[in-house]
Image (tube, rainbow, N blue to C red):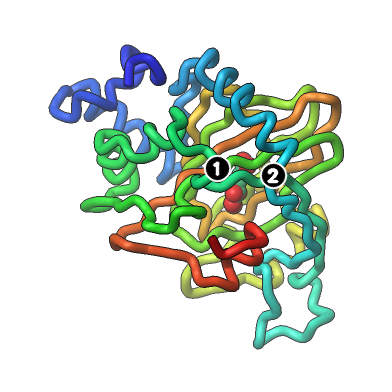
């Protein structure tokens, strides 16, 4: 993994080392304090650049154009009238490659590397995490060209793990509002306020290539702002679950990738 990752700065391969422990402690403290931690430059920038170059033809030829108008929940909400401002709809557009389209890549090697999975579980204070069995969903790579964006949403899993491969010239910021809701309180008024652009606790960060970003995606509202300029924003999303064997349903696969296999 030394060829892919900067293990001198981030000793993920030495889980019994005090430096590993202090890195995990730092990540846990960041997650508790701001709902997110970053390992800037975890992947070597030249490896990230090579991964983008390898995927470019596939993005051009057979990536799924994920384009839809959706509310923050990706579905209607039974307790709310359709005109409730928490259900305001926005447009998402990106190109998505699935794990089956990047076989043999450094990204899949990293995704399956047991020390990476162990490290992530420790930062999230979980006894262990499991890779998905889903051949499409386990790793996705999204490309956002000029004008494309991922709009406001919550994720299904408690934590979300991404790695930025290429930064755009402008725009394409990661905007997030930590703990906008909780498992007990949907906070629809707070959601409506955020969607009106009136939540002062909303923050935007620009990720740099090679940076690992882990955040509490289930209750953190987040989006990717529209990309500006000729260089695409390219990011990998790694999906892990606390139980083994997780797969998406056919309707989820169709919604996210336009195919079921
Ligand atoms: O592209 C990002 O920075 C976030 C990705 C994301 O939120 C998602 O895939 O659910
Ligand atoms: Fe997300």
Position of residue 111 measured from the top left corner of the image (x, y, whole percent): 39, 39
- The answer to whether one can see residue 35 in this image is no
Confirm if mark 1 falls within 8 A of ligand 1.
no
Position of residue 196 measured from the top left corner of the image (x, y, whole percent): 82, 59
Q: Quadrant of the N terminus?
A: top left
Instruction: Tell me what residue is drawn at x 71 percent, y 84 percent.
Output: 80
Judge from the rendering whether residue 145 lies leftward or rightward of residue 213; answer left or right.
right
Q: Nearer the viewer, residue 109 or 71?
A: 109
Badge 1 crowding class, 10 Å Cα cut-off, few under 14, some 14 to 19, many 20 or more, is some
Would you identify the image quadrant in which residue 148 lies? Answer: top right
Instruction: Tell me what residue is drawn at x 74 percent, y 26 percent.
Output: 168
Q: Are marks 2 and 1 in contact (CB under 8 Å)?
A: yes
Q: Against 55, is 8 above or below? A: above
Q: Against 155, is 23 above or below? A: above
The residue under label 1 is: 101
Q: Against 40, is 69 above or below? A: below
Would you identify the image quadrant in which residue 78 lies? Answer: bottom right
Judge from the rendering whether residue 13 lies leftward or rightward of residue 208; answer left or right.
left
Badge 2 crowding class, 10 Å Cα cut-off, few under 14, some 14 to 19, many 20 or more, is few
Position of residue 182 measured from the top left corner of the image (x, y, whole percent): 50, 66
Distance in Å between CA atoms under marks 2 and 1? 9 Å
- The answer to whether one can see residue 20 in this image is yes
Position of residue 200 measured from the top left corner of the image (x, y, whole percent): 72, 48
Helix, strand or loop under label 2: helix
The residue under label 2 is: 62
Instruction: Tell me what residue is drawn at x 52 percent, y 23 percent.
Output: 210
Q: Quadrant of the C terminus?
A: bottom right
Q: Nearer the viewer, residue 239 or 65?
A: 65
Which disc is residue 78 wearing? none
Instruction: Tell me what residue is drawn at x 45 percent, y 27 percent.
Output: 39
Helix, strand or loop under label 1: helix
């Amino acid at each position: 993994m030394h060829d892919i990752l900067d293990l001198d700065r981030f000793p993920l391969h030495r889980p019994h080392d005090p430096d590993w422990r202090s890195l995990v402690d730092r990540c846990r403290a960041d997650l508790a304090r701001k709902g997110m931690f970053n390992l800037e430059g975890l992947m070597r920038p030249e490896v990230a650049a090579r991964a983008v170059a390898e995927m470019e033809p596939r993005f051009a030829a057979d990536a799924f154009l994920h384009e839809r108008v959706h509310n923050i929940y990706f579905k209607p909400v039974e307790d709310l009238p359709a005109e409730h401002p928490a259900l305001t709809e926005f447009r998402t557009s990106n190109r998505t490659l699935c794990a089956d389209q990047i076989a043999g890549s450094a990204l899949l090697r990293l995704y399956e590397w047991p020390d990476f999975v162990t490290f992530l579980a420790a930062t999230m204070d979980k006894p262990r995490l499991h890779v998905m069995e889903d051949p499409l969903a386990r790793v996705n790579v999204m490309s956002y060209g000029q004008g494309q964006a991922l709009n406001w949403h919550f994720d299904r899993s408690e934590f979300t793990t991404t790695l930025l491969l290429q930064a755009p010239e402008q725009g394409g910021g990661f905007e997030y509002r930590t703990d906008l809701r909780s498992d007990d309180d949907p906070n629809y008024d707070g959601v409506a306020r955020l969607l009106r652009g009136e939540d002062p606790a909303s923050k935007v960060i620009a990720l740099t290539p090679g940076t690992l970003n882990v955040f509490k995606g289930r209750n953190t509202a987040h989006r990717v702002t529209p990309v500006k300029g000729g260089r695409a924003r390219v990011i990998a999303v790694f999906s892990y679950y606390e139980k083994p064997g997780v797969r998406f349903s056919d309707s989820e696969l169709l919604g996210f990738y336009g195919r079921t296999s």
